[in-house]
Amino acid sequence: MKEQLAKIRAEALASFQEAKAAADLDTLRVRYLGKKGELTAVLKQMGKLSAEERPVMGQLANDVRAALENALEDCSRRLEAAALELRLKAETLDVTIPGKAVSLGHQHPMYIALDEIKDIFIGMGFEVLDGPEVELAVYNFDKLNAEEGHPSRDWSDTFYFDNESRVMLRSQTSPMQVRAMETRSLPIRVIAPGRVYRKDEVDATHSPMFHQVEGLVIDKGVTMADLKGTLNTVVEQLYGKGTKTRFRPHHFPFTEPSCEMDMQCHKCGGAGCSTCKGEGWIELLGAGMVHPRVLEMAGIDSEVYSGWAFGLGLERTALKRFKIADLRLIFENDVRFLEQF
Amino acid sequence: MKLSRKWLGEFVTVEANDRDFAEAMTLSGSKVEGIEDLGAEISNVVAGRIKAMERHPDSDHMWVCQVDVGQGEPVQIVTGAWNIHAGDLVPVALHKSTLPGGKKIEKGKLRGVMSNGMLCSLQELGLDERDFPYAGIEAAALLNDYKAIDPEKPSIPANVQAGHKILGPVVAAVVVGVIYNGGGDWCISLDWGTGNGNAHNVRLQNIHKGDMVAYHTETKTICTVADLHAEQREFPHCIPDGIFVMHEDCKPGDDIRTVVGLDDHVVEFEITPNRPDCLSVIGLAREASATFNAPLRLHEPVVKGCPEDAENPLARSLVELLDVETMDPELCPRYTARMVRNVKIGPSPKWMRERLRAMGVRPINNIVDITNYVMLEYGQPMHAFDYRYVQGGKIVVRRAKEGEELTTLDGIVRKLTPNMLVIADETRAVGLAGIMGGENSEIVDDTSYVVFESANFDGATIRKAALALGMRTEASGKFEKGLDPLNTLPAVNRACELVEMLGAGEVIDGVIDVLNYVSQPTVLPVEPEKINALLGTDVSENEMWTILQKLGFRTHRDGTVTVPSWRGDVKCMADLAEEVARFYGYNNIPSTLQMGETTRGGYTPEQQMERRLGALCRACGYSEIITYSFISPTCYDKIGWAPDEPLRNSLKILNPLGEDTSIMRTTALPSMLEILQRNFNYRNKSARLYELGKIYLPGGPDGLAHEPKMLVLGAYGDGIDFFAMKGTVEAILRDIRAEEVTFYPCGEDPSYHPGRCAGIRAGEQHIGVIGQIHPAVAANYGVDIELYCAELSFEALLAAQGAGAEYVPLPRFPAVNRDIAVVCKEEITVGALEACIRKAGGKLLREAVLFDIYRGQGVAEGSKSVAFNLTLRADDRSITAAEADEEIKAVLEALERELNAVLR
């Protein structure tokens, strides 16, 4: 019997090692340890043994059972690990296959530029105004000191809706200066972005509809130095710290003194190149101190209050910002263009 | 405005190089757009004198010249031109020289003979005959150059000999001697076999000893190609072209740029409309003088004049000759005129032509050139007309009569209106005031009495007339900005001075000067504190005075200044502040950040909503577009609107760029469709786009428009269908927390597929419409695939925006889920079923979600099976199966009762 047990043990352990799958192990378990299994069969013969032999054999048989059970456990774990490994291998993916597309939309580059500008001014305590594009000539011209006879009032330059040249498409966002002065309480700090219209044929740099951003500050003791300081800060935020600017005299009917603000050409650093047409500087915007007559016409005492205003062309800013060469792309809205931003 | 730096140098000495000059002038307010070096392209080209020339041994048309170019030994140059002679002074492009147009000249052999450069024509120097009128070339028909058109039938035999008859009295003659008399005049000695003799006063430049010419024995002249009635190609080298033979005061070796006046640099200024005074050399000299602190050298014109001579009927006085009347004094504040007699029309001198050319003005003749010269120098437009055609000796400045016609100098017949001012004589208009002269009084070669007009006209009148006639001229461009009336007299005197200087005629004593205005100089107080307060500077009072003085302001002891007459733009303290700032330097003004009351700033709820909607659209994969606000009226037809659609009532631009951009859109749909079409045409496989843009509805306050914003979505391709777009709109509405959102079938919108279009509501609020674009509408845009669009009112979205989020406790008890499938008629909508379920469901029904629609086997034709998953839950307990069953039963009963939808 002892030999029988040893044989079972040896055979079983060997066969366990050969098992290839969990199912094989199950079969072996039944074969050796099951109710009708070989070990059980041997144990059934225990009755035939003497009382002295019985505990010894019992002990031996239990040892064999424990050994077989342990071995089964080990083998099962090994097989499981192998099976997992196999499964993982089978599940291997080509991770270079593109992911499932999540298509996000894109903001129009011009409005990206506009949002940057808005955020900068909001951060400086400004509010954003919107106003009518179909505008009265009084607001677009008269109250801005561009009286009857000013060339920009010509029908060759400006779109009109009536023969009296009373209602028009605003040719600048500057009427928002007047509207702000007439309706808001002082002090005023606003920007007013929006569409403007001029009778220009479409080409690489012109469009009958384009966008401007107007800015206006009215308060007691506002100076041209404030204008410079504020706009320099804005330009630094837009184009990076250390951006060099300059101001040069210009003329607008509704500001006095008036100026244009240039930024040193980023490409040549002021030496002159094709980007800046050899000038070393790139024009950014027009600005100036609000003309006392404009203040007075809006009912603001120019002896007490002063202000400054600026206007910048948004298209030009966006074109510069994104190095877009042709204005027509802005209004063409080709998805291959839009998706670049 | 162009400015010759040489001309500027007459009034102010500025040493700065071009770059520094441009920078300084720009920073003081005269923006420089560019500077052109007129001779930049020319290098190593000098004057040369031809010492000797002989025919090329191996060519029938080339000459080999020995040219003195000031280098000791003459250089040898081969040329194909025939108009030169030994002794001529010509431009020589030496070895390694450059010419306009990027042309490079190097030495080389021409048919075996070394040529060390090239002799130049006017054109090769970038000039033409207007620049050097004396350089015109005329050519004789040289018989040795004759090439028969038909070699079988030559008009002149190849072996033509002296004495052969050519036609009529014209015979072939050999040139035996050429003598230059000067002044472009030759004496040619000829031998025509049967006789010999000289042809005098010959002005044909291509004749050399040994040539065979056609000699007219009766007129004793040498024939040109035209004289022989021949074609140019029969005499290929006898052309009116050749080398520029110079009559200039220069010596061999001199730089040609200096000789011909191409040593000038021309500055292009952008002059702002408030500074018409700077549209002149003197005006810019004044600015340059102030900018560089260099003295301004102005010059008072001096006219000698000629007194009247009572004995001589040709020397009548000015008052006898001319009378001026201004009918509309307010339109002509001043009219100044002088007259010149015994005028000799001819070219103006080289220095004047050079200056005109540098400033972009074409030289014409001495009198016309003088008027242009004065206009450029003084900024005062002038006109000269032939006195012969001033009938009655009277000039009348008046409004044109309705329909009156005038042929202007450009040869165009102009139809005039009473809004235009004309210069007339007693009977007819002779010029358009301030714009252009009339052809009927033009200066011509035999003009002998000239009237110089130097007037001041009302700017707005001139501008409107020029605009109406479509003829903005140099003069009208100046007048329209408002000129200084005090400038007319110095300008006319300057013109007369130039007439005397050029010997172009005799200036008649006296000036006619009609003054219709009272000169009222502007006097302003100088308020240094206010100026500094406006600028944010600390400029000393003294510095302010200095700046104003150098700009021509007269300063007074009482602290005021008189504004110079040419500075009509200076009217108040702010204007003086700008003058101070310009010369103190804008860039010396400090850069400060505002003090004062702080303002809150920030976005309004409306602006926040705009940003949110944009972000939402992009999150759903839609990209932003920007389209024009104006559209074509035909757009309304294209999107299928009925002829009586009220929204067709649009604001109409009276002067649009074109029909396509002539009305303000009352719908943003056509703009979106156009962009979808464009992307489709560009073969972009799919597009998902949005625009948050305005529409323009008539009837706003003050005759303006209502300008509500619309959110328009448009898409095609890449799995886009009705439900894909609906999903996006639902996501947007969910995100803004709109409540009671419903989509209802809407077959009435003509732009959309009648069976695939829904109206959208949030409660009672109409939000907009969504659907597939009607195939017929898509076809109107040339698109044959399905396009989907949604149009949502921004105002409605804003109104439908729900309250901010508030936490609802998560369910603590489990829910029971039940699936039901009911069969109903096809026309019963899922929305109706869902509404019925919700209504019938009690408090326990939390959700009803559609999960299947089935048609086919087991379901009758015309019916469908619709399956919902219902979620039932109570907040305070677990519900029992019996409770759930009861709830479901109620729902099913309601469905059957109300919609005839029965459990499948």
Image (cartoon, helix red, strand yellow):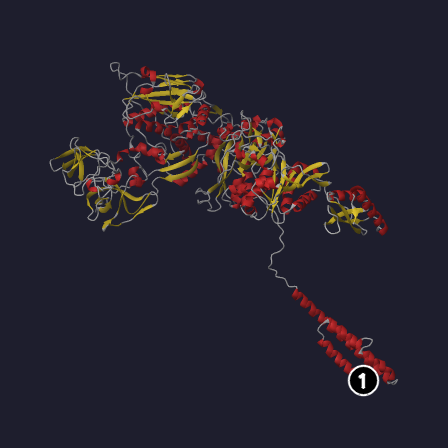
Q: Is residue A322 left or right of residue B513?
A: right
Q: In this view, does B430 lie to the left or right of A93?
A: left
Question: Relative to the observer, which residue lies in front, B393 or B191?
Answer: B191
User: In the rendered picture of this protein, how many numbered marks are placed on residues?
Assistant: 1
Position of residue B207 measured from the top left corner of the image (x, y, whole percent): 19, 38
Position of residue A127 measured from the top left corner of the image (x, y, whole percent): 62, 36
Identify the amino acid type marked 1. Answer: Lys
Q: Does residue B735 appear anywhere in the picture?
A: yes
Query: Circle 1 marks a residue in which chain?
Result: A
What residue is disc 1 on?
A: A2
Q: Is residue B319 left or right of residue A314?
A: left
Residue sitting at the far top? B310
How many neighbours does mark 1 have within 10 angstroms: few (below 14), some (14-19), or many (20 or more)?
few
- Quarter of the rendering containing residue A83: bottom right
Would you place residue B728 above or below residue B484 in this image?
below
Residue sitting at the far front? B861
**Secondary structure category for the residue under label 1:** helix
Position of residue A89 measured from the top left corner of the image (x, y, whole percent): 65, 66
- Quarter of the rendering containing residue B436: top left
Residue sitting at the far right? A51
- Quarter of the rendering containing residue B352: top left
Would you place residue A75 above or below residue B12 in this image?
below
Question: Relative to the observer, which residue lies in front, B834 or B786?
Answer: B786
Position of residue A223 measured from the top left corner of the image (x, y, whole percent): 55, 34
Question: Relative to the observer, which residue lies in front, B375 or B591?
Answer: B375
Question: Relative to the observer, which residue lies in front, A179 or B544?
Answer: A179
Q: Is residue B734 left or right of residue B374?
A: right
Would you place residue B387 above or below residue B860 in this image?
above
Q: Does residue B803 appear anywhere in the picture?
A: no
Quadrant position of the N terminus of chain A in the picture = bottom right
